[in-house]
Image (cartoon, rainbow, N blue to C red):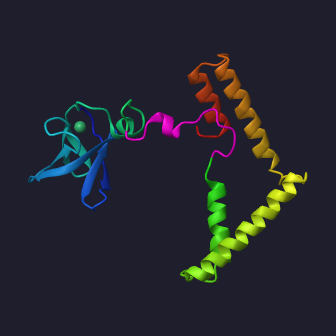
Amino acid sequence: MAGIRKIEFVASQKGTPQVLLDGYVYNKNAVRQTCIHWKCVKSLFNGRLSTSGDFVRNVTDHNHAPYIVSTWVDDDARFPIQLWNHPLTVGPRTNNNLEGFHSRLNQTLPHRHPNIFRFTEVIKKIEAADKAKIAQLEYGAAPPTRKRIYRETENRLLRLKDKLLTRQKTPLEFLDAVGHLLKLA
Ligand SMILES: [Zn+2]
């Protein structure tokens, strides 16, 4: 591939150096005087790369999709789309509520390594408090209000989903609008 392209070094789970280029991951194969040869982690014959310093000298084609595609998108992906993509779910879109629970739990615990008896005490207290909250809601107490900006974002998202489902927007138009709404782009 022509032109000067910079490579990105990453580390494997074992800590050995790897290179990330165009979504493909490479292991070090051989070190020569003027360059380093790398080979794709996924194939024996395809996907070779040679680098010199931080730059690409030469790269060959792969006979498979990049990591992100084979992991998240392909029909036989490691994490199939149905597992992680829930476009019609209404409710929290982040795990912030779980993070909040963990931080409350940590604050309630006497120290970092409580014994099992202290731990179960704390868990029982939390359960009792939550049961009381649920009972209040069942008797008609108003649920905690969310900030106006979050409510508005949520409503706009619902309207966009509706436009996608009723084909008033194409998937690309939908993604464009969502990206704009959530300031992803
Ligand atoms: Zn490859």
Residue at (24, 32) in percent of width and height: 2
Is residue 137 on the magenta stretch?
no
Q: Residue furthest left?
A: 33
Quadrant of the frame with the C terminus: top right
Residue at (35, 36) in percent of width and height: 70
**x and y, in percent, of residue 33 in the image:** 8, 54
Q: How many marks?
A: 0
**x and y, in percent, of residue 38 in the image:** 18, 47
Residue 93 found in image quarter = top right
Residue at (64, 83) in percent of width and height: 110
Is residue 81 on the magenta stretch?
yes
Relative side of 164 to 36, left or right: right
Quadrant of the frame with the N terminus: top left
- When the figure is inspected, residue 168 is found, relative to residue 82, above or below; the finding is above
Residue at (75, 45) in percent of width and height: 150
Quarter of the rendered structure image containing ligand 1: top left
Q: Nearer the viewer, residue 36 or 146?
A: 146
Q: Main secondary structure of the magenta part?
A: loop
Residue 109 found in image quarter = bottom right
Q: Residue furthest right?
A: 140
Residue 57 found in image quarter = top left
**x and y, in percent, of residue 124 in the image:** 69, 72
Q: Which residues are magenta?
A: 78-93
**x and y, in percent, of residue 16 in the image:** 24, 60
- When the figure is inspected, residue 10 is found, relative to residue 72, above or below; the finding is below
